[in-house]
Image (cartoon, helix red, strand yellow):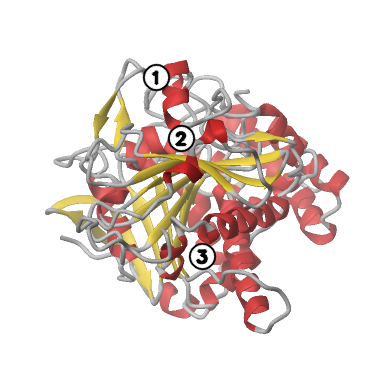
Amino acid sequence: MAFITRFTAVDILLGLAFASTVSALSRPLVDEDAVLLDSRAIHAGKMRYVNDSGVCETDPDVFQASGYADLTKSQHIWWWFFASRNNSASAPVAIWLNGGPGSSSMLGLFQENGPCRIDANGSSTSPNPYSWNNNANMIFIDQPVGAGYSYGDLKVYSTNDAAVAMWKTLQIFFADPAFAPFAKNELALWTESYGGHYGPAFAHYFLQQNDAIANGSISGIPLNFKTLGIGNGITDALHQYASYPEYAASNPYEPLANSSVIASANSSFYDQGGCRDQIIDCYTDRTKDVCLAAEAFCENNVYGVFLDDFDPYDVRGPLEDSYPPDPSPLLQNKTFIEKIGSKQNWTSSNGQVFNNVFSTGDDVRNFTPDLEAVINAGVRTVLYDGDADFIVNYKGVEAVVDSLNTQYTSMYRQQQFANYTVSGNVAGLVKNAGNFSYFRVLGAGHEVPAYNYTGLAVGQAALQFFDQTMRGEQLSST
């Protein structure tokens, strides 16, 4: 499997009005001269992009655009926008971010939930009838600078740095005349893996910036932020690292190590001065050296000891699993790159970005306070995970969820898991409490929308829980 999210070190993201003649899908009114990438100089705070490349979304009535938000003259964030296949003028806008840190969100686009999916050969695609742009406007963003097609000075060294850069990216995006009308639409952030850091921190920062705009302390475009979705997210190392030996010993498939390895990992976590105590020290003072020491110890003695014989992103497969297919042959094709307007060759994951962020100890810092603040602010929040994923496994995510202290905690603890069905087929187990839901997806690996479930097509269950969430509903069976 290609690099997709975190732990890269272990197995080394309209005119202000619409023309009266636009289609029912509400194509933006665009100044063609303003978006010719090769004839427009870089201007900080502006965009460069191409329209309707015909790539991936092949319906000519569905608008798409791809290009760059230029944060500065030396920092360029790649984005790819697909209008909703239905009612795009009023449909919500959903951002998709892969993790890493430093992994490209083109992985999500082509392997998971975009308008097309990469074929087994890695050089062609097939239409995706269960794309998340069926009923939402989707923006896939390669972030921070250096991830995927993004390029320039690599100045992000933490999740909080990345949050600031993402806010700037969205300010540039929604200020562009072609996309300004979408700023009023409800906005969602969906992310996975290291997105367990990104999601809470970015969402909390968005809310804080909105408050600052409202009280006049800064100027900007307020984001109509309503929804947060996190798949297999690493949010709280203290609770999640304890899950590695537990999942290795007991999961829905088979034991992943012998009893002596599992016992050793458990001891390394719980013994005095071990992984648990070092993470607590990191949580207490948050200094770089303390957090780096905790990460190194936990990697070497707790989760790293399990990673020799199976695919950590789908324990049912071998270490070198080829699913989902690697999109590199397509995304690195020169003709393809020119057609979509990229100025940079593509890599699935940028090791320098990864090292920059990990060098500050960011990986083992705790983002549950941000998550709690977002939930308590009334943002519709869904955490989900595939039960075949080891690297950010469901036992750890459920421990995080159980530890949360929010306005819905009491209600959540009173709930029992219920089957979640899609067209009568059981796809997972769910709990709902107010605006919060948790969903354990059966038979899915790390990239949940890339998998199929008994009696269902690939992506069918993921689209159902995505659409329900985007409508502000609790997750309910069909």
Q: What element carries label 1?
A: loop
Badge 2 crowding class, 10 Å Cα cut-off, few under 14, some 14 to 19, many 20 or more, is many
**How far across and how far down the image is residue 5, in percent?**
54, 36
- Reading the image, the residue beneath label 2 is 106
Q: How far apart are marks 1 and 3 (CA)?
A: 34 Å
Verify CB contact (< 8 Å) between mark 2 and mark 1.
no
User: Is residue 256 positioned above or below 382 on the image?
Assistant: above
Q: Which of marks 3 and 2 is in front?
A: 2
User: Is residue 271 positioned above or below 223 on the image?
Assistant: above
Q: Give the mark nearest the N terminus, 2 or 1.
A: 2
- What residue sits 44% from the left and 55% below the top? 178
Front residue of this view, candidates 255 and 334: 334
Q: Give the mark nearest the N terminus, 3 or 2.
A: 2
Q: Distance between the residues labelled 2 and 1?
A: 17 Å
Q: Is mark 3 on a helix, strand or loop?
A: helix
Q: Distance between the residues labelled 3 and 2?
A: 32 Å
Q: Which amino acid type is marked by label 2?
A: Met
**How far across and how far down the image is residue 146, in percent?**
65, 34
- What residue sits 65% from the left and 72% below the top? 208
- What residue sits 56% from the left and 33% below the top? 39
- Reading the image, the residue beneath label 1 is 322
Does the rendering let one see residue 444?
no
User: Is residue 237 positioned above or below 209 on the image?
Assistant: above
- Reading the image, the residue beneath label 3 is 402
| Left or right: 228, with 423 as reference point | right
**How far across and how far down the image is residue 107, in percent?**
45, 34
Front residue of this view, candidates 340 and 265: 340
Badge 3 crowding class, 10 Å Cα cut-off, few under 14, some 14 to 19, many 20 or more, is few
Q: Which amino acid type is marked by label 1?
A: Ser
Q: Give the mark nearest the N terminus, 1 or 3.
A: 1
Does the rendering let one see residue 59?
yes
* Quarter of the figure with residue 255: top left
